Amino acid sequence: MILENVISFYNKKDTFKVIAFLILSLPAFQYGSQFQNLLVSIQTPNFTCQYNETSHQIQISKDQCTMTINGSNVKCQHWTFSSEPFGKTIMSDYDLVCDYKYVGDLLVLLWYSTSLMAPVFGWLADKYGRKMISIIFLSIETVATFILAFTPNLSSHIFFRLCIGFSESAYHICYVWLMEMVNKDFRNVAGSFFWLYGSVAMTVFPLTVYVTRNWRLTQLISLTPSILYVLILFVPESPRWLCVKNKKQQLMESLQTIANINKMDLQLTPEEIKIEKTTKESNKWNAFKDNNFLFLASTSLFAVFSISILISAILIDLNLLSSNIYISMFVLGLMEFPGALLSYLSMYFFKRKRMITIFSMFGSIFIFLSVTLSKVDKWQSIFRMIFGSIGKVLVITSSQGVLVYATELFPTTHRSLFFGMLQIILLMAMTAAVYINKLNQFYGFIPMLIYFLLNMISCCLIFVFMPETKGLPIPETIFDQRLLVKEREQEYLEYMYNRSDVVNSDREDSDASSEMSQLINRKFR
């Protein structure tokens, strides 16, 4: 019996799917808040050199870093910071200006460098379970976020910022956890709106920053939804992960929980579910010896990189859409909502590959056009915001589609490991965007031209060489994935059903079991 149909049958009602979605997507709020809080907190307010000398022959340099006293050059040691335009930031709290102005960029890179450990954390989730690893990392994130708001110096700030960065792996693990528990139809909803809390965070954050003007207060405010993390304790472990780990008893308990929440009877025995033999896949790193895995992974990761670098470039340039940082951040956050809705509609009506290529291509075109327009001229600034907003909506749509596509491409035995690799790609995209954006000092359109070309290349690779996954069962093992090849999707479909099309003939003949049997023997269309 194929697990895809078991999960589909006991998820016919929406109750469990909606509850699991609302709970497991909670980490998105912190994920979005922490990134924006970091970007704003490293902004440098206006400052002036502070001195106590009574001599009238004092000249302060234009950059407020040095002063000349009676003909001698002296470095400024203390500064007075204005509350405009950013309020109280890390840079003003720890006097990170002049010789230490590079620390802001360093903090961003350090925070993202924690992604280097993500494949290890993904491997842990594949080995020990989605639930346990998620709970551990979410606990670390909550404690570190709270303490960070009270850090007295830069050293302690860096330590707890790194703890938060490491714990961000929980976001992607929860994403995998949710996608493995819902049926194929609900994957469109879960994948499109999983970032919903993150969208709320990105929209609300500019307002809280504008009101509080204090990075410590915004840090504490971002903790509000974390109170609900306790609900994750009651979400069952992924049935797919339990299946490939041959944990039959726990698998039945997980399915029983889903059935109870949906008010259904679990008329199923462990013997009726096909348990894949995964002993040869106990060493996760052996997957990198498989040519098909390497091809799918490298192509998917390049697609993620080409889209993420464009999104990173937008997020880094806080004045991209408007000269007012708060308006720009608010509009960019607001665009997350139509992006999620459009993502769902496009995944519902289009196949995965077509959806990704179309929206990625046109999104990069609109963003490229937006940067060619002036921020100063009234009408050009209006069209700049319109084109930039449309472009971001389209790129967000494409990025959500890529994540769902990746979920359907990679097997349960290695899915969290792949998403850990994906976090390294996000690090590379962010790092590259920081430096590519600096090219606008020469010609303003050069960075976006580079991003546009990267998107065109990734779109061609996906459309020409990658298999279509919409409507197909999710592969459970590397062997399953090896059969998922372009233009051979029907063969893969037949294999997935024929290998385990077994129903217990001695089972009690009831309406529920009859309906279950019909669903099990039905082919995906």
Image (cartoon, rainbow, N blue to C red):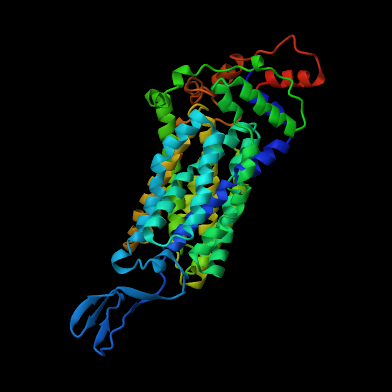
468 or 266, nearer to the observer: 266
Q: Which residue is rendered at x = 41% and y = 29% of the image?
A: 295
User: Taking 215 as reference, is 110 left or right?
Assistant: left
Which one is in front, 21 or 66? Answer: 66
Q: Is residue 274 left or right of residue 375?
A: right
Asked whether the viewer can see residue 486, the reply is: yes
Residue 446 appearing in the image: no
Picture coordinates of residue 250, whole percent (x, y): 62, 25
Residue 142 pos. (x, y %): 53, 50
- Is 179 on the left or on the right of 161, as rendered? right
Residue 58's place in the image compared with 92, above or below, is below
Pick the residue in front: 176 or 138: 138
Q: Is residue 231 above or below residue 323?
A: above
Asked which quadrant contains residue 471, the reply is top right
User: Which of the image's four quarters has the N terminus?
Assistant: top right
- Up/down of 2 relative to 98, above or below: above
- Residue drawn at (31%, 83%), measured in percent from left and top? 52
> Which quadrant is the C terminus positioned in?
top right
**Residue furthest left in the image:** 71
Please provide percent x and percent y for residue 253.
66, 26
Q: In the current view of this chain or complex, which residue is farthest to the top? A: 506
Percent of width and height locating residue 512: 78, 22
